[in-house]
Amino acid sequence: MNQRVRLRSSAVTAALALAATSLVSATATATATASASATASASAAEAGTRDHRTPLPCPTLRVSEGWHGDNKARIDALVAAHCHDRGRKPVAVFDWDNTVIKNDVGDATFHWLLRNDRVRPPRDGDWSTTSRHLTPAAATALGEACPTGGRVLPTSTDTRCADELLSVYASGTTTAGKTAFAGHDRRRMEPQYAWLAQLLRGWTTRQVESFAAAARAENLAAPQGATQRVGTSQVTGWVRYYPQQRDLIRTLKEAGFDVWIVSASPEPVVDVWAKGVGVDPSHALGIRNTTEGGRLTAHLKGCGTVRDGEDTMITYIDGKRCWINQEIFGVRGPAAERVQPSARRQVFAAGDSDTDVSFLRDATGLRLVLNRNKNELMCRAYENGDGRWIVNPMFIEPKQRKAAPYPCATTGYTAGDGTAEPVRRSDGSVIPDQPDKVF
């Protein structure tokens, strides 16, 4: 073969090899592209499935008995409107005593303390150290009635001491009828309630929780209507959870609400009881003592402009607003005492007393009121200026209808200095007297 033929043959061979290489490369590229396309399509399909996933059903109230009018339907509608909200959970806040339960867990605990010798005497017998608001008359009466010294007071057998303690706590007067507390702001402090927390001084939080647990067991086991003897008095001896409120809290939690308790009872006591409706102690707010060496002191934690140990604000009326703003919404300093923008307020609130009126007014969705014939609260609830108030009779032993209208236009509001005034709307206008309609 001559040289020209050999060169032509080599060129053909090279061309065939190059063509084969290009074909393999093109095939590989096409295969990879098809594979990537298929993967992308599968991912898109999966994402589409996730984006259009069937939403979780919104829960509704299961207990129908005891709800007045269309209250149940309105609550179900509120739950549906906020069910599984994306982003920040909607907040629901409940008062505790006579709102979630019938009767008062603070009272139940105080009675148990006296019946079981768990109140510690003040050092040197000076009862004024137990509360800055205790009057000299009350401090003297307690000093005369109760023995000094000893680790605990023998109130299970010393009826004179037990009677004086019970009178000061329950009625705000001595057994002789003298005023027991003074000098407090009636919109921020109820010294009788605070005094229970202050009398827990010297005990650890765990010990107080054990006292509350014992009182809880006794009061739940006692028949409805039972009484117990404390000193020489017969006092309420039973407590019940409201099935309707248990159901409501369950429904709200299942719908994705952030559910809280705010109470004017001592916080360790509320913690014990709140577990019975599925609310964790981290979501229960009550009166908080300061601590020293791991034990409670007779001084209280502050909020807003009130510093720890000043003992001038508890979870009571405007104090409840402050503690909710501070502990739930993270508002600090003086701002915690003020009404917040709607995005930083609870959607739902429930209460039964004038002590709850401020945080109920702050709720942006619905405000459930159990009717206990409390003047300011019922004036605002019945006037229902923005249509967000719903009133329900108490679920156990509801109050009788109040014969006279609520004195909204004259004395329904109690000012910080104790003065009785008209109940006013946010614009300053006076709410007219309201008849009792839901009982």
Image (tube, rainbow, N blue to C red):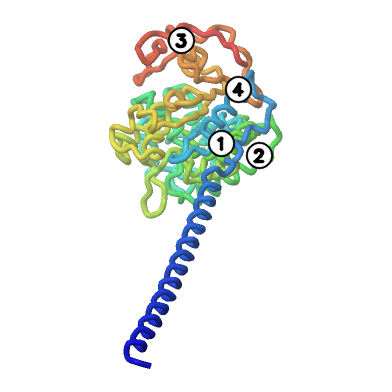
Gap in Å between the C-alphas at discs 3 and 1? 33 Å
- Element under disc 2: helix
| Side of 238 where 425 appears, left or right | left
Task: Look at label 3 and name its amino acid.
Answer: Cys
Q: Quadrant of residue 10?
A: bottom left
The mark nearer the N terminus, 1 or 4, is 4
Q: Which residue bears the numbered disc 1?
A: 252
Observer-nearest residue: 6 or 398? 6
Residue type at tag 4: Asn
Residue type of the residue flagged with mark 1: Leu
Q: Quadrant of the N terminus?
A: bottom left
Q: Position of residue 248 (x, y in %)?
A: 60, 33
Q: Which circle marks residue 71 in the picture?
A: 4
Q: Residue at x 61, y 30 (%)?
A: 102
7 w.r.t. 160: above or below = below
**How crowded is the residue under tag 2: few (<14 C-alpha within 10 Å), some, or many (20+)?**
some
**Cβ atoms under marks 2 and 1 closer than 8 Å:** no
Residue kind at label 2, given as amino acid type: Leu
Residue at disc 1, secondary structure:
helix
x and y percentages locating residue 116 in the rendered image: 57, 44
* Residue furthest out toward the bottom: 1
Labels 4, 2: front one = 4
Label 4 – label 3 distance at C-alpha = 24 Å
266 left or right, relative to 187: right
Disc on res. 408: 3
Can I make out residue 256 in this image?
yes
